[in-house]
Amino acid sequence: MDTRETILDTAAGLLQTRGYNGFSFQDVADRVGVRKPSLYHHFASKEALGLSIVRRAIAGFEEFMRQVSGQGARYQLESWFRLYQIHITPGRMLCAAGGIITAGDTASDALRARARHLLDTQQHWLERVCVEGGWAAEGRDAQQLATWLLTSVQGALLVSRVYGDARAFDNTLGFIRQQLSL
């Protein structure tokens, strides 16, 4: 793995466990084992690093959508749940968007916009899956159901993180499965 990817992996881990304001360039440099000025060779600023982390998360979700495309809606939705369970680790981490959003107004407009883009990408995908699965009609119904799914999963992730326990996340998934008869 090259240095840039190591920096991105390290910073993404810090972002997801500490939030955007909870780590510095020095923290990243210390964990990667390089001097802080070396980070500037790869990223002009912490904001540029944050933008790259979320850009990579968006690309990862786009790849996920390609991989599950053509599968049944139930499979796609369950795969989305597993994506959170396996890669985000409820009770320990936030998603990349959550790591930015928790910074509130201290995150730049560009960072907040990139985080919103990641959530919007998931929202639109969920709308399509909800229609394909027959859980919602196209239009407002699909939008409302997708919003409920996204906010429920993101909220459960946050609550699980606060308590350091994945049960809130698991219970939320159980309720969603029950409501959708999965």
Image (cartoon, rainbow, N blue to C red):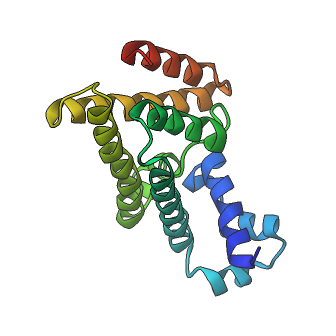
Write the residue at 56% across / 82% down. 44
> Vertically, is 107 above or below 92?
below
Write the residue at 73% across / 63% down. 27
How far across and how far down the image is residue 59, in percent? 49, 63
- Side of 99 where 11 appears, left or right: right
* 112 vs 170, nearest the viewer: 170
Write the residue at 62% across / 42% down. 88
* Residue 93 visible (yes or no): no
How far across and how far down the image is residue 4, in percent? 68, 77
Q: Residue furthest bottom?
A: 41
Write the residue at 56% across / 55% down. 20
* Residue 17 visible (yes or no): yes
Q: Quadrant of the N terminus?
A: bottom right
- Side of 151 where 164 appears, left or right: right
* 143 vs 77, nearest the viewer: 77
Q: How many marks?
A: 0
Report which quarter residue 87 is drawn in: top right
Q: Residue furthest left?
A: 139
* 157 vs 106, nearest the viewer: 157
Report which quarter residue 91 is drawn in: top right
Q: Quadrant of the C terminus?
A: top left
Report which quarter residue 118 is drawn in: bottom left
How far across and how far down the image is residue 141, in percent? 19, 29
* 21 vs 88, nearest the viewer: 88
- Side of 125 where 98 appears, left or right: right
